[in-house]
Amino acid sequence: MTRPGMWDALCGVVRRDLLLAMRRRSDAAMPVFFLVIVASLFPLGVGPEPAVLRTIGPGVLWVAALLACLLSLGRVFTADYLDGVLEQMVLIAQPLPVLVVGKVFAHWVIAGVPVVLLSPLLGMQFGLDGEAVAVLALSLLLGTPTLSMIGTIGAALVLGVRGSGLLVALLVLPLYVPVLIFGAGAVASSLAGVGAEANLSLLGACLVLSLFFAPWATAAALRIALE
Amino acid sequence: MYWGSMSEFWAMGGYGLYVWTSYIVTALCLVWEVLALWRRRAAAAAENRGLL
Amino acid sequence: MGINWLKYSAPQAFYPLAGKLIPWFSIVAALAIAVGLYIGLLVAPTDFQQGESYRIIFVHVPAAWMSMFLYVVMALWAGFGMGLNARLSFMMAQAIAPTGAMFTFLALLTGAMWGKPTWGAWWVWDARLTSELILLFQYAGVMLLRTSIDDLRRADRASGVFALVGVVNVPIIYFSVKWWNTLHQGASVSMTGGSKMAATMLTAMLLMTFGFWMYSMAVILSRSRCVILEREQLLSWNKSASTPEPVEVR
Amino acid sequence: MLQAVALSCMRGERRLFVDVNVTVEPGTLLTVVGENGSGKTSFLRILTSLLSPEAGAVLWQGQDIRQLKEQYYAQLTYIGHLNGVKDDLTPVENLMASAGLTGDHHSNPLVQDALESVGLKRMVHRLPTKVLSQGQRRRVALARLWLSTHPLWLLDEPFTSLDTASTALVTERLQSHLRGGGLAVVVTHQEVALPSDVIQRLRLNG
């Protein structure tokens, strides 16, 4: 199944995207700042009652993470589409879905990993206890790659379309619902003392499923966009 | 026939508002869709005639 | 000329055929809905648990079934379109979306109308309602994606990909909300209220569903005729604007 | 051997060309000329399989490129209308990155040689591409030709914004490619200064 050079091409895509993100660090950091700000607004809006914050915490943090991921989707393919790199990527002796996995991985490293790393801090802002914080980080670790996977389908579909920023939100958010339910559910059930295993394993199932389908859908969408 | 009188039928055992709203909105939607389609078709046909 | 007439013959043969079928579907739809309404509103006895409000299900359940059925059919047509490179398939998919969205909206609205007297709330986050809501968003996504892409071929295919992705999503949402509810409060709400359905009720519901189905057929065929007209119009306009000349090689 | 068989193309609802038949033999060049909007770029994109024709097929060594897919791409170097060059990366990084994708590992000196062959001096090799001029950026894209070992080149207006000296360099590279048994299809509005026995011309009258 593995063709010679497939792994090289995948690494090549990841390396280039990470290098580009390094060149534009402020752009890459924007979604993370957004996440922190949104998460900090909620206690100000809802009030500082610890019990309330603890109940809404998992949901708020997950929704904020989801929006932060959405915010960075525009960058995944747009620049490549405009400067012709995408055309070159499609015309390579490697299957396009493999290259898409590379793009998704790079997006996750740039937009997903910082969210996972920051989540314990934000969790403590919302008064989550040690175990809940750990579950929050774990659920984000399992969930954010799925968000990147699904998000790139939308990003590929709206390439070069007017009003693409809003449209991608409309397309992608319904697809994010299961991840949100299981992700926030894992933290909530840990808080309720039920145990988070069920939700976490469902998150894992979502990840596997999206790994299976999303690269093909994205590849199809990219070919359509390039026609 | 299940109902005793006309007013009983309209009242729907006290749930008239809910039941009739559901039915009327559904009917309106279906009728509106048919009308909209009819107009769309007329417009498309007129445009085509103008071309030929 | 090396034009592939086969591809064009499809919509052109389909157009008159659809025209002939529409009246029949309309008549059957009108009959089925009339009889369904008669049985549902006038003959069927009251439900012991819910009282007369249960009569909403004669529009609610058919609308909900149609909304899901039409989405799957739409995605199937889009899938055929991409697999066989057939323009008519995409036209059918395009024609289905608005009707499907309308039934989704009706299912949500009548669901709220039924929920208020039954559960005491317009809206409950149960699996069926939530997946129906997401379905509405997905219909909106399919239609918006189509309208925001100017190139027809690309619009067809992009919205088709999204429709297909959505087919996977809706059952996942259904089960995720179900598990979510059971994991959380266990406050599961069931639509049927546990009551066994009387034969007359079932008959009315099935008749209404059949009527809605036939109505959808008529409306979708008629809309696909509009779509064909509108697209052919563009085509003929461009044909007259620029006639391609043969190509020379030397 | 690259063959276009009965190709027809439609963009949107506009028909660009109908029934194009052309064969490109190894060692020869096909230039595609025509007015703006006659479908030159679309023709080239059909040859890359990025665009699907309304009717007809493209054959590479007698096989449909839609079936060959990646096997065909492995034979192909395409330089499109867009440069395919990242503004934030230096010319060297750009070439290394695109070589990394195709699976050819080029050493740094080899890449620098390619850049010099296309007339880019060593001092610009380490600058971000965005500070370069339009012509210099085009040359970064074209430097891929010096690194390419693929037999088939598809070039869309390679000479735009190039000065005469660089045009000559690219033409020279094309000639050596053809001499080595390569094939090329070039969309251009200017004559390619090569012997007429290797050039075939396709005019599209949209």
Image (cartoon, coloured by chain):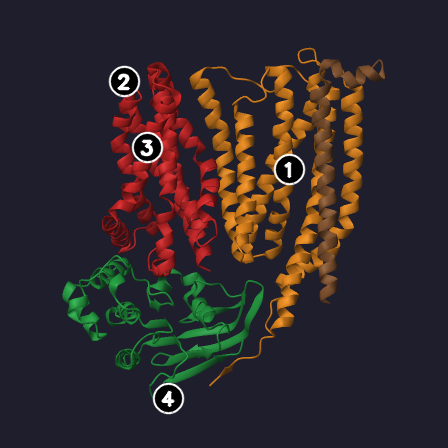
Q: Which mark identifies residue A37?
A: 3
Subunit ID for the residue under disc 3: A
Circle 2 residues within 10 Å: few <14, some 14–19, many ≥20:
some
Q: Nearer the viewer, residue C79 or D32?
A: D32
Residue at the spot 69% in from the left edge and 28% down from the top edge: C59
D86, above or below A116, in the image: below
Q: CA distance from mark 4 to mark 3?
A: 68 Å
Q: Are marks 4 and 3 on the same chain?
A: no
- What amino acid is at disc 1? Met
| Proximity of marks 2 and 3: CB atoms separated by less than 8 Å | no
Amino acid type, callout 4:
Asp
Q: What residue is shown with label 4? A: D197
Whether labels 2 and 4 share one chain: no
Chain D takes which shade in the image? green
Mark 1 → mark 2, Cα distance in angstroms:
46 Å
Which residue is tagged 2?
A: A129
**What label sits on residue C102 in the rendered view?**
1
In-front residue for pair D73/A30: A30
Q: Secondary structure at mark 4?
A: loop
Mark 4 neighbour density, 10 Å: few (under 14) some (14–19) many (20 or more): few
Residue depicted at x 34% and y 72% = D153
Picture coordinates of residue C51, whole percent (x, y): 70, 13
Query: Residue extending furthest top?
Result: C48
CA separation in Å, label 2 and label 3: 21 Å
1 and 3 marks in contact (CB < 8 Å): no
Viewer-proximal residue, D106 or B31?
B31
Task: Farthest residue to the bottom: give it.
Answer: D196
Give the residue type that dot 3 points to.
Answer: Ile
User: Where is residue B4 drawn, in percent x and y?
Assistant: 84, 13
Question: Which residue is painted at 52% across and 53% down in the image?
Answer: C149
